[in-house]
Amino acid sequence: MAITFKQMVAEARENVPAVTSTEAREKMKENPNTLVIDVQDAADAGACGLIPSSLNISLGMLPIRADLELPEQLREPQLADRNRPVLVTCGAGGQAALGAYVLKQMGFTDVGFIEGGTKAWKQEGYEVE
């Protein structure tokens, strides 16, 4: 039976924690090793802005960049440590939930997503690039 994007996001939300923009900002301050990944396509991320120091990896490329069994040139070195804290964001939060769920399925132990994505981050008055 086919499922919709909305159903996929609901399943992801059941399996990975959401954090508010304020909670995300605090986590980043408390642990500078926290990696923030924006899973929007590059053109969309540029229009919305990026959270400072975040890494832009599209949702489609995320499992490839995080796969330790693929050739090194395809991987993102910052995703080698499965215990590194990771927060995933996107424009409004749906793709972020999916990205966080993918990383959890790939063995990441401390992964969540920013509720409302970069849009919510900006509404809180936090800086974007």
Image (cartoon, grey):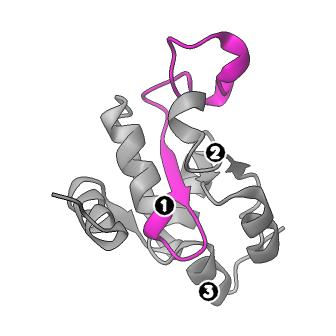
Classify mark 3: residues with Cα within 10 Å, few (<14), some (14-19) or many (20+).
Answer: few
- Spatial distance from mark 3 to mark 1, Cα to Cα? 18 Å
Q: In the rendered structure, which disc, 3 or 1, sits on the residue that comes first in sequence?
A: 1
Residue name at image x 55 percent, y 50 percent: 59
Picture quadrant where residue 77 is located = top right
Which residue is tagged 2? 32
Residue name at image x 52 percent, y 64 percent: 24
Magenta residues span: 66-95
**129 left or right of 20?**
right
Classify mark 1: residues with Cα within 10 Å, few (<14), some (14-19) or many (20+).
Answer: many
Q: In the rendered structure, which disc, 2 or 3, sits on the residue that comes first in sequence?
A: 2
Which residue is tagged 3? 124
Please, what secondary structure does the residue beneath circle 1 have? helix
- Spatial distance from mark 2 to mark 1, Cα to Cα? 20 Å
**126 left or right of 39?**
right
Q: Nearer the viewer, residue 39 or 79?
A: 39
Q: Nearer the viewer, residue 21 or 69?
A: 69
Q: Which mark is residue 96?
A: 1
